[in-house]
Amino acid sequence: MDSQALSLELTDLDPAVRRHALQKLAQALESGEIQLGDAGQLLNLHCHTCYSYNAYGHTPTSLAWLAREQGWHALATVDFDVLDAVTETLDACDTLGVRGGAGLETRVFVPEFADREMNSPGEPGICYFVGVGFTSPQAPTQAQTVLDEMRRSAARRNREMTTRINAFTAPVTVDYDRDVLPQTPSGNATERHMLVAYDAAARKVYPKRSDMLAFWTEKLKTDVATVDAALGNAPSPNELLRAKLMKHGGVGYVQPDGESFPRLAEVSAMITACGALPTYAWLDGTSAGEQAIEGLLQVMLAQGVVGLTAIPERNWNYSDAAKRAKYATNLDAIMALAAAYDLPVFIGTEMNKAGQPLVDDIVGVPELVAHREAFTAGADILYGHTVLQRALGQGYTSAWAVGQLPKRAARNAFFRQVGRLVAPGQSVIERLHAELRGLSSVEILAHLGA
């Protein structure tokens, strides 16, 4: 058996190809033909997939295999505006014996901070927001209406941006349906898919590299060396084009306002209605909003937020020692605040930009080692929630959990213990559904052997 070839098939955009490859790999694991170690301490709870954009071409299935192969403690996927990866993520994790979770990321408008930036640079009032611990792509009617509008709005913004950029880059133009959507398995394109399309279109119009470089040099008002360094040998979502065409000040950019995205309250309610956990996506502690983090957290808590999402690499990976120390201090401060408010923290690397690590080194980087216990607790809580939500509909934000454990500290401790005690697998979920129905939180832990 060629395990390397099968691993590559896990990234195929055809789900049937992925399922077949996963089955073969799982059989090889069970038979002992492939031998892998036990789970270790590393974890990634914020992996974007092909259902939005993964810079390394990963699907939910290939991420589950990566986690199993490298012995991660836990994995969770996250995609922009859609729940398309949820079922595949959980099924693949079950098959491979990986502690799994799934989520969604979007942007919301926060009226109370309309005049301050939070975690979206240059965009006062606009906030990246994450729901973790979804267990189904299906949602209650009202929540589904919000999800449907999020998908439609994202597509509408992309199409409008394409129109503006086309007018600027002609004769290099992109047809959204022909050039962008085929890159995605379910039609949920992102700016990075659009960037690949523009890069490819320029190479087609200007097959001679020097001509292509001259085109972009003139359009982007920069020097040819900068363009040459940014553009590789194949179309990619390079950051130079993104900055010049799509971000603040670019020809495709439109400054968002209170009508550009749904409100915090609406999206947080949708996430909770789906049985998941609304979380604030903390950036790095430098914006005006995050400088007033306690006030911002009070707003978030009032709207049902129960945790934080973080990308720790932003707070240590700098060559300048003073800058590294400053950002690490900010990380220490938000972790202390999360502990004070009993907010679990869910970390990851995103993987939606080339160069981002596959997993955070929480065992080797001193700034992260200091918070390894809290990061691991977040993973255990997320997995414990996912288990009980799947088995009983009794996850972290359920009426059952809030009634049994009204204080977040007690809820955190309970779901962490569940996450540590329950082995992954679909048969486990089915067994727990039969065994745990009607039990209290104390009885559940006793049954699981706590």
Image (cartoon, helix red, strand yellow):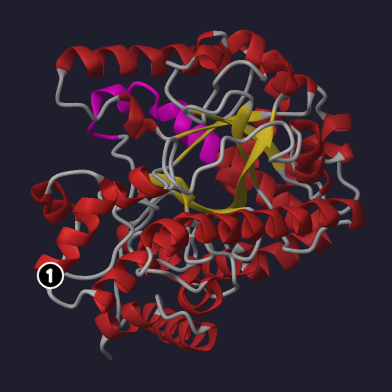
Magenta stretch, residue numbers: 363-379
**Residue 161 as seen in the image, left or right of residue 104:** left
> In the rendered structure, which amino acid carries the disc numbered 1?
Arg
> Can you say which quadrant of the picture contains the C terminus?
top right
Magenta includes 378? yes
Which percent across, then down, holds residue 10?
41, 77
Q: Which residue: 62% across, 50% down?
A: 104
Q: Of 347 and 169, which appears nearest the observer?
A: 169
Q: Quadrant of residue 12?
A: bottom left
Magenta includes 240? no
The residue pinned by badge 1 equals 209
Q: Is residue 77 above or below residue 340?
A: below
**Residue 270 as seen in the image, left or right of residue 71:** right
Q: Which residue: 51% across, 12% down?
A: 288
Q: Is residue 299 above or below residue 368?
A: above
Q: Which residue: 76% across, 34% down?
A: 263
Q: Can residue 422 be seen?
A: no
> Can you say which quadrant of the picture contains the N terminus?
bottom left
**Residue 380 as seen in the image, left or right of residue 361:** right
Q: Can residue 301 be seen?
A: yes
Q: Of 272 and 178, which appears nearest the observer?
A: 178
Q: Of 335 and 435, which appears nearest the observer?
A: 335
Which percent across, then down, holds residue 248?
44, 36
